[in-house]
Image: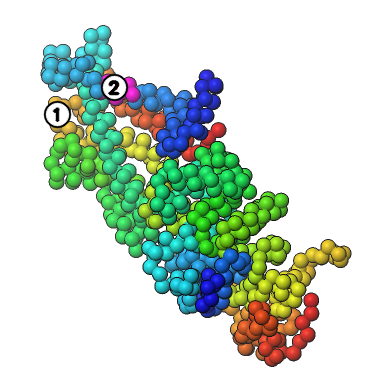
Amino acid sequence: MSKKELLNIENLAINYITDDGTVKAVNGIDIKLDKGETLGLVGETGAGKTTTALGIMRLVPNPPGKIIEGKIEFEGRDLLEVEEEEMRMIRGNKISMIFQDPMTSLNPVMTVGEQISEVIEIHQDLNRQDAMKKAEEMLELVGISKTRSNNYPHQFSGGMKQRVIIAISLACNPQLLIADEPTTALDVTIQAQVLDLMNDLKEEFHTAMILITHDLGVVSEVCDKVAIMYAGEIIESATLKQLFENPKHPYTLGLFGSIPNLEEESHRLKPIKGLMPDPTNLPTGCKFHPRCPYGTDLCSKQHPKAIEIEEGHRVKCLIYEGLVDAEVKK
Amino acid sequence: MTSSIAEKRDITSKNKNKKRSQWAEVWRRLRKNKMAMVGLGILIILIVSALSAPLIADYEDVVIKQDLINKLEEPSLEHIFGKDEFGRDIFARIIWGARVSLVVGIVAVGISVISGGTLGAVAGYYGGKLDTVIMRIMDIFLAIPSILLAIAIVSALGPSIINLMIAIGISYVPTYARIVRASVLSIREQEFIEAAKAIGASDFRIILRHIIPNALAPVIVQGTLGVAGAILSTAGLSFIGLGIQPPAPEWGAMLSTSRAYLRYAWHVTTFPGVAIMITILALNLLGDGLRDALDPRLKQ
């Protein structure tokens, strides 16, 4: 293991076992992340992005969620083997998470100052006054006046709430920050502000980040690496440059194709045909084959392996294994 | 007036001591609610008169000494609430009875809120088998009429004021357990609980600091109503000889023993009844105001 390596997820599989069937939310994913690096985890709704994030935090609701196999190595230790009590000391301290909706992820009956100081109290040996002081510093850091630390969440706008949440997540200077669609609930101008803020703070604290999003625009602004998720699998992973200049997987191409182009005049968006498969009843073979324009009989039978087509660029598609003959074009 | 409020707000926002500022804030909001202040005023009057009862009327001479010649005397200037069936001054008995009724009502509800609330919060938060076990036990308790349960407990423990409070407290536990469990169930699914887990908060901290403050509103309302129920249960138990032992005055007992004279001595039942009613009204007004004041979202 190299010294720079922070997180190494291997073959992680998470299922939700319900009476109506087993939902295979995450099916054998591999993620590697170095210190200070940012990974964009991109995929449609239901691709298993959030479950992956909760898996890393060991917060998958159990029951019905269950981590079936795999390992999550963080700073050289497998998080899946750590005792719950120890895991609690990692959460919020070494790994923290930003949730999707700032409107609901703050406690409505606690002041924002209390909520920031709470995480400091839990993980650092400080008394209330000192924790509160540190919380006020954090608040200033995210661009909110510390005189507002006595205010309640409902007195803040959505963008400010998300700033408070960022302050909470960075208060203990974590090694890894998992941001689950941090900008989805915000409007576009605020999105840019929040992203800039996260970027600046990430640089300042030298925090690695996993940014979960379905917005490729956000990815291009913030990330160093990208992993595209589909039906619980990472079907393509590459550096930002490789992926944007040379996308390989038909699904990735479809994603790029569905973004309207400013230069061409088009009246309709070009969506990827079909819907995400039902996770209780995933297709055999390649999970994408029913929607893939290049799909063949073989695709429905054989599960593709991850092929490294250039340094750091891996694709899961039979075309690149040389088993399906097709010319993939943008 | 407005400037003093503004000043106060300024002081509280500068106040670093968060605990004090939080309660000061609740008090500031409560003070704006006129009805709640009326309720609080009535309660304070009741409590003060209960505390100063020995100054108002002598226990031996006025409260329990019988004067059968003047029994059921109508209200007059000398005896403003009249006299009861044994010729005792009703006003003095109500003042002395407040000591018992208020304490029994509030302590019994306190017992049931604390134990029922804890059980309900634990059941709702952890769910699964623990939830099933706790709630089925609560169901068994619910299946027995609460007054019968209280009778059983008092007769097992022996009649005394403390056993009475315990008995009534226990008989109302399932109600609070159910209320708290229901609100905890909806709160624990909210994202801020997940967020609290994600910062490494322990279950104890999550229940205590995140769930209970959010689940408080229905409990406060039910609790203030519950005091009324507890006072009435005390009356019932006193009536069958398991509660407050005669000749000690107690509102519910006064009410139930005097109902035999309802047709020709209206004052004997009316005044204890009014005392109970006013207490309950005051508690409800205060409870309502308190619920609003404790919710920062309603703050203007």
Q: Are marks 1 and 2 on the same chain?
A: yes
**Residue lying farthest front?**
A3
Which contiguous range is marked in magenta? B44-50
Three-letter amino acid code at the position of disc 2: Val
Q: Position of residue B164 (x, y in %)?
A: 20, 39
Residue B48: mark in rendering: 2
Location of the C terminus of chain A by quadrant is bottom right
* CA distance separating discs 1 and 2: 24 Å
Q: Nearer the viewer, mark 1 or mark 2?
A: 2
For mark 1, what is the residue?
A: B246
Q: What residue is rendered at 51% in x and 65% in y?
A: A54
Seen from the viewer's position, the closer of residues B52 and A36 is A36
**Identity, as a three-letter code, of the amino acid under mark 1:** Pro
Q: Residue at x 61, y 70 (%)?
A: A47
Q: Secondary structure at mark 2?
A: helix
Q: Is residue B283 left or right of residue A240?
A: left
Q: Earlier in the sequence, mark 1 or mark 2?
A: 2
Q: Residue furthest top?
A: B77
Can you tell which quarter of the image residue A299 is in?
A: bottom right
